[in-house]
Every structure is written in C-alpha cells, then in structure tokens.
Image (spheres, grey):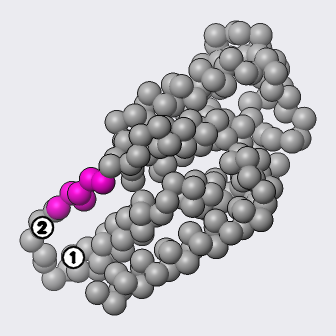
Amino acid sequence: MTERHQPYEIDDLELRRAQQGDAAACRALVMRHQRRVLGQLRAMLIPAGRGGLVEDLAQETFLRAFRALPRFRGDGRASLATWLVTIATRVALNELRRRPPRVEALDTVTESVKAGETAVIERHASGRAIEQAIADLPPAYRGAFLLRELHGLDYGEIAKVLEIDVGTVKSRLSRARARLRQALAEVQDG
C-alpha cells in the first residue's frame, strides 16, 4: 500500500463494524471515500458525455461494495481505497461498453480579454486542452492513465483493477501518453 492511500483508510474496528452492517460505519466509509470514487467516475464518464450518470454510478459502486464488503479482507493485497476505485472503474467501463460514448461539443465561452488576463486565459486554455486530450483517449487507455496519474496506482494494482496483464497496462499507458503528447503538440502548433 502506498503512502498516498493511507489517509483514505478507515481503522480495522470501523471496517469490521461496516462489514457487519453497522449503518454509522457504512456512512463513515462513504464519507471517507466518496470524493475519490466520484473523481474516478467523473474522469471516466464526463468525456464520454455521460456526466449525468456519475451520481447514479457512485451509488451503484457503493452498493456493490457493501454487498461484497463482508468478503473484503484488507490483508495487504489491496487497500480499501484501491478496492473501491477498482469497483468504480469497472462500473464505468461496463457503462461505456453498454452504450457507445456520444460526442458532446465543448462549451464555448466568450470573454472580453484585458491586457492583464492573457496569462490566466492561456493557463485556462492549456488546462482545457489537457482535459480534452484525456477525454479523447479511448476508455481503456483513459482508465489506465487515470488510475496511474490521478490515483497513483502502480502497474500491478492497475492490472488487477482492469483484470489485464501488467504488459498490457504498460502498453496502454505508453499509447495514452503518446496520444496525449501528439494532441498537445497539435494544440501548441495550432
């Protein structure tokens, strides 16, 4: 387990109480992990035009987790946080497989540009370009990329989450990064 995951973990007693169905412990688990789960779902679904499903799929994620929680063993193979992100990623990928993504136009924003706002606008444009480049990645590449860069999972953890070989994880990450470099170079040149 990496240092990054520790602040998200609940203590053993609280986990055992949640596994026994204690409502207060279950609420604590949701409160502690909802931000991470919602973040992963947003990053997976919004680019595919499915932002309206984020809340519903977060509920589905926690329902699945609570059904399986009695069997969860925090024995070092996976932290609770990683396990929940795994469920959220699989729920999102299942949704994306069910119905192909639809393309939505980016919001167009017109602003008056003042001399002092140029740097802020350029940073905003760069941020949007990065977001769009990530959004344009195929779901399989985007999932691996977000698990690595947003959640800090190592290759082995990503392989378990996505149920693929470590070599496939490396390949997807390499291809995702290459596509991102190409997309951002095109924006910079354009």
Residue 11 image point, x, y percent: 79, 28
**For residue 67: magenta?**
no
- What mark, if any, has residue 111 been given in the picture? 2
Assign the C terminus to one quadrant of the image: bottom left
Give the side of residue 115 with respect to residue 100, left or right: left
Q: Main secondary structure of the magenta part?
A: loop
Q: Closest to the observer: 166 or 99? A: 99
Q: Closest to the observer: 93 or 184? A: 93
Residue indicated by mark 1: 117
Q: Which residues are magenta?
A: 103-108
Question: Furthest-left residue in view?
Answer: 112
Residue 154 image point, x, y percent: 76, 59
Residue 88 placement: quadrant: top right
Q: Earlier in the sequence, mark 2 or mark 1?
A: 2
Under circle 1, the secondary element is: helix
Q: Are marks 2 and 1 in contact (CB under 8 Å)?
A: yes
Under circle 2, the secondary element is: loop
